[in-house]
Image (cartoon, grey):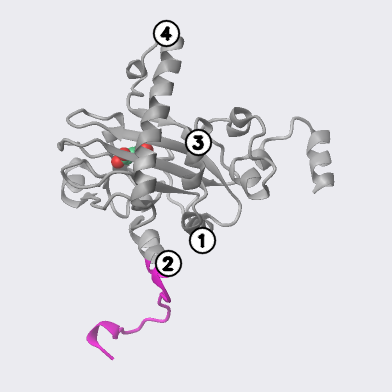
Amino acid sequence: MSMKDESYGVTKQNLVKDVVDEKLEEFFIRGFTVLENVLTNEELSETRKRLDDVYRKQVEEAAQNNFKLGDIREENVARMIFAYDDYFLNMVTNSAIIGYVKKIVGHYFILHLQNGIINMPDEKHHQSSWHRDLPYQDFVISKPLAVNALYCIDEFSKKTGGTLVVPFSHKMETIPSETYIEKHALQVEAPAGSVILMDSMVFHRAGYNSSTIIRRAVNHVYVAGILKQQMNIPSMLKGKFSDNPFLRMLLGYDSSEANSVSEYRLKRLKK
Ligand SMILES: O=C(O)CCC(=O)C(=O)O
Ligand SMILES: [Fe+2]
């Protein structure tokens, strides 16, 4: 037995059998972990191109409604990108990620959001303010209700503005002081193609991009089935993908509220 295996007076210890367990232990204790090599280089170049295209489309949509995304601090964020380009459903349904989500929030979960973040060189991004992805929530809970999968589409480093996180902050009701954050926040450094798996209650923010490359990310929040979606995804998709039972659950087709007691009971009758 090596020194590091010794313990005293301990009756229970986590058991780590494989790399998934190792990552999960890190996730539950620190609030986040990094999974490398989730996307290939080909997928990354395709994603960059398609993300920029969807963003352009959303800029045009705003223009048609006579405003600029910058007017509402939405510049360089593309929302619900899978509803604009099916290609982005691959990230939502990635089997490795879904495997983790099941182990974290349980078997019944829905997609709350999918955002593309375009962190431009030498520009302050709105996501660079400290926040939780379940905003305005100030509780502590023993099991996560929500988990983020933040895909690094370009390299995350100190220079490119990798995400900053406050470890363990999913266990704190309030955001720690500036002094504490200054001392203990970490900046995630990860190669393009990695995924940051994070408890949605962890305080985090996008870093400042002082490089010359664009630092893109695609963020996903998966929530326990009792929570809401950021937008009404089923109404946005108009039935698309609803013939697949897994996608029905994930995209929220099966969790919309019944409009009456009769409708609620008729739904149960069909189950
Ligand atoms: O881009 C990042 O580093 C963080 C993005 C983020 O916090 C978000 O999309 O909620
Ligand atoms: Fe966030």
Residue at 42% across, 67% down:
20
Nearer the observer: mark 3 or 4; the answer is 3
From the viewer's perspective, is the residue at label 1 or at label 2 nearer? 2
Q: Residue 100, position in %: x, y?
A: 47, 59
**Label 3 – label 4 distance at C-alpha:** 24 Å
Horizontal relation, residue 164 to residue 81: left or right: left
**Residue 74 on the magenta span:** no
Q: Amino acid at mark 2?
A: Val
Left or right of 150? Residue 215 is left
Q: Determine which residue is flagged by label 2.
A: 20
Neighbor class of circle 2 (other Cα within 10 Å; few <14, some 14-19, many 20+) is: some
Residue pushed farthest top? 66
Front tag of 3 and 2: 3
Q: Label 4: state its secondary structure.
A: loop
Q: How far apart are the two marked residues, 1 and 4, measured between alpha carbons?
A: 44 Å
Q: Specify the segment rendered in magenta.
A: 1-22
Q: Amino acid at mark 4?
A: Asn
Mark number, residue 82: 3
Q: Secondary structure at mark 3?
A: helix
